[in-house]
Image (spheres, rainbow, N blue to C red):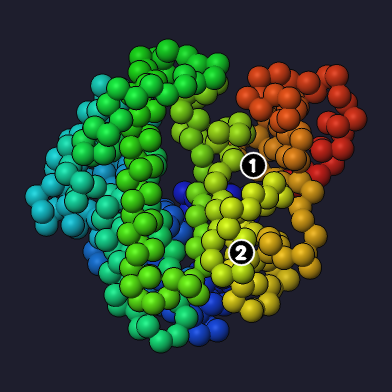
Amino acid sequence: AYREMFNGYDMDPSRQTVWQLLRTAGYRTLTCGKNDLHKKTRWKGLDGWTQVLGQYGFSDAIDQSGKMDAVGGGLPVTPHCSYTQYLQSNGKLDLFKEDYARRKTESTYATSDWPSPLQRDDYCDDFCGRNALELLSRTPREGPWMLWVNFPGPHDPMDPPRELQARYDGVVFPDPIAASNTYQNKPVNHQRVRRNYAAECEGIDEWVGTILDAVEQRGQLDNTIVIFASDHGEMLGDHGRFTKHVPYEGSVHVPLIVAGPGIDAGRVDDSLVELIDISAFMLDRAGLGIPETFETRPFLNSSFAPRDYQHSALRDWQAVCTRTHKLVISGPAESRRTELFDLVTDPAELHNIADSHPQIVAKLAGQLPKT
């Protein structure tokens, strides 16, 4: 169904998943952090486990809510996941709730620029990182395993602990492209927001290293493949926008780094890849077949033709992208807007060239899914 394109719904547990296939093949499948697989159901289990996670194909999990989900989305803030249970048990849940209420009233979630009142040990990303280590410690060294770590950050609000924020005091970042000094009628300090974003990224980088150290201590780093990616980008003030939801590159173009046995170190590849292709890559590297129902193809496998184009869609827009151009169709049918950007000569997507290149528009429009 079309609504399943949004993460405000629970994934149907009857659908086949890559975790089910790996578990059936003998892998111990693990996840921690904010996986958003059952986002609509607020209850995540106070120990991070619910029955539906087993139905999705996981052997073990420590699930947690994301930042804004943790404060209830307007509902009473009571422990409903492993993270909120942790905060309450340490007397920090009310502090967390009060800070987020202030961010929503004095600024916006996206542009509030002060640090978290929580110490780093209590911060959501650090909680997630510790849980990754806990899951590894509960996993026998014999037999294969797959660990999916879902750090809540970097994500609005940009609220790193002061320990991380202080590392960027005085650092000057490039200003946003086509920026606005306000957002949702509130003033924006772009430099502070960008420093905070960088601080969140650095905290996660440290945890990636810590987790890899733990894998190495298990004696398994040489036969472990590491995949680093994100579910969406962050506009950070470009085009006067923050967060995601828009078809600009800052929102839809995400990192993808893979490392491990059989993968050339330092290689940069501009092949078109979609996030769903990570599932195919994992199954391929595990020596398993890819179900015909999976609209995915493994990257770094010469037996599969690379993608010629990528799709993106959200609410009121659709986009199709090649290595050189992006077409965006947005708005209701009676006032539909067509935009074409040359990603080679105009990577900031400032100039709509749709009117002057109707043949490219027609070709790319033919690749959009019919709804």
Q: Position of residue 305 (x, y in %)?
A: 80, 60
Q: Which residue: 32% across, 46% down?
A: 203
Q: Position of residue 371 (x, y in %)?
A: 74, 45
Residues 126 and 56: in front is 126
Q: Quadrant of the N terminus?
A: bottom right
Q: Left of 214 or right of it: where is 319?
A: right
Judged from the image, the secondary structure of the residue bearing numbered disc 2 is loop
Q: Could you say which disc has been placed on residue 313 in the image? A: 1
Q: Give the mark nearer the N terminus: 2 vs 1.
A: 2
Query: What residue did someone put label 2 on?
Result: 263
Q: Could you say which disc has been placed on residue 344 in the image? A: none
Q: Where 322 falls versus 60 (above or below)?
A: above
Q: Which residue: 39% across, 63% down?
A: 212
Please say if the residues under marks 2 and 1 sit with CB atoms less than 8 Å apart.
no
Q: Which residue: 76% across, 33% down?
A: 325
Q: Left of 31 or right of it: where is 266?
A: right
Q: Is residue 333 visible?
A: no
Q: Position of residue 168 (x, y in %)?
A: 30, 30
Residues 192 and 72: in front is 192
Q: Left of 16 or right of it: where is 326?
A: right
Q: Where 64 falls versus 245 (above or below)?
A: below
Q: Amino acid at mark 2?
A: Ile
Q: Quadrant of residue 198?
A: top left
Q: Is residue 176 visible?
A: yes
Judged from the image, the secondary structure of the residue bearing numbered disc 1 is strand
Q: Left of 299 or right of it: where is 307?
A: right
Q: Amino acid at mark 1?
A: Ala
